């Protein structure tokens, strides 16, 4: 869509001799409205900001770009905070806060971080779309990794493996929340 400058703008330009030469009607192209499409490239959008993409449901959703590996690593390092929070929440609910609770919390944080670095980081390197997972996928993935580590490495009974799965799920949810913010 082309629009022309009004007469007053032409008169100002001519009277101040800013145009330098014979007066021509200047035109400019009006910006096109942003349309929801299936492909962000087809819409001419790029960059680190979110894009509106229609998935065929008639409702647009925010399609977030893939985050860098360094930011995913940062989110992975912050994720054990969720596991420690879940441990303290369980301790308070049981009304049995142990005097060794901070050592147990440090052990849980170290295990969550080590499990994330060993079992999650290689997958994040290989599949970049998983660096910003949904909350459900992150919770299930964290629970599976934590219960696998609890059962295979520590040979825990299933009741304790369930607690480890809870810690892993909260750690995964924390990772997903931090990754969505970055």
Image (tube, rainbow, N blue to C red):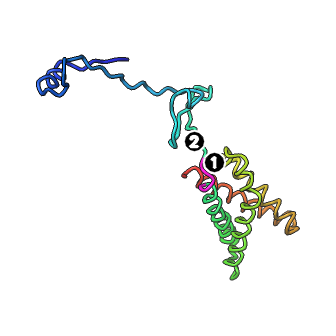
- Please state if 160 lies on the left or on the right of 41 as rendered: right
- Please state if 42 lies on the left or on the right of 17 as rendered: right
Indicate yes or no whether the magenta region holds residue 68.
Answer: yes
- Asked where in the image residue 150 lies, by quadrant, the reply is bottom right
Q: Nearer the viewer, residue 1 or 10?
A: 10
- Please state if 130 lies on the left or on the right of 29 as rendered: right
Distance in Å between CA atoms under marks 1 and 2: 8 Å
Q: Earlier in the sequence, mark 1 or mark 2?
A: 2
Q: Nearer the viewer, residue 85 or 32?
A: 32
Pointer 2 residue: 64
Pointer 1 residue: 132
Residue 85 position within the rendered picture, expressed as x and y whole percent measured from the top left: 64, 66
Residue 8 vertical position relative to residue 155 in the rendered view, above or below? above
Q: Residue at x 67, y 68 (%)?
A: 93
Q: Residue at x 80, y 61 (%)?
A: 162
Q: Which residues are magenta?
A: 67-71
Indicate yes or no whether the magenta region holds residue 173.
Answer: no
Residue 53 position within the rendered picture, expressed as x and y whole percent measured from the top left: 56, 31
- Please state if 149 lies on the left or on the right of 49 as rendered: right
Residue 11 position within the rendered picture, expressed as x and y whole percent measured from the top left: 14, 21
Residue 112 vertical position relative to residue 125 in the rendered view, above or below? below
């Amino acid at each position: 869509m082309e629009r022309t400058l009004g007469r007053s703008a032409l008169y100002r330009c001519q009277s101040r001799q800013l145009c330098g030469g014979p007066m021509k009607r200047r035109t400019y192209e009006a910006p096109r409205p942003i349309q929801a499409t299936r492909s962000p490239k087809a819409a001419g959008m790029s960059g680190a900001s979110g894009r509106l993409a229609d998935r065929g449901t008639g409702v647009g959703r925010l399609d977030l770009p893939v985050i860098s590996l360094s930011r995913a690593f940062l989110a992975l390092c912050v994720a054990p905070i969720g596991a420690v929070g879940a441990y303290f929440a369980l301790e308070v609910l049981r009304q049995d806060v142990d005097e060794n609770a901070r050592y147990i919390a440090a052990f849980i944080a170290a295990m969550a971080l080590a499990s994330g670095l060993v079992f999650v980081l290689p997958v994040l390197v290989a599949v970049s779309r998983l660096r910003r997972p949904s909350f459900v996928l992150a919770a299930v993935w964290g629970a599976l990794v934590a219960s696998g580590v609890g059962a295979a490495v520590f040979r825990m009974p299933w009741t304790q493996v369930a607690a480890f799965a809870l810690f892993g799920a909260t750690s995964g949810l924390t990772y997903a929340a931090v990754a969505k913010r970055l």
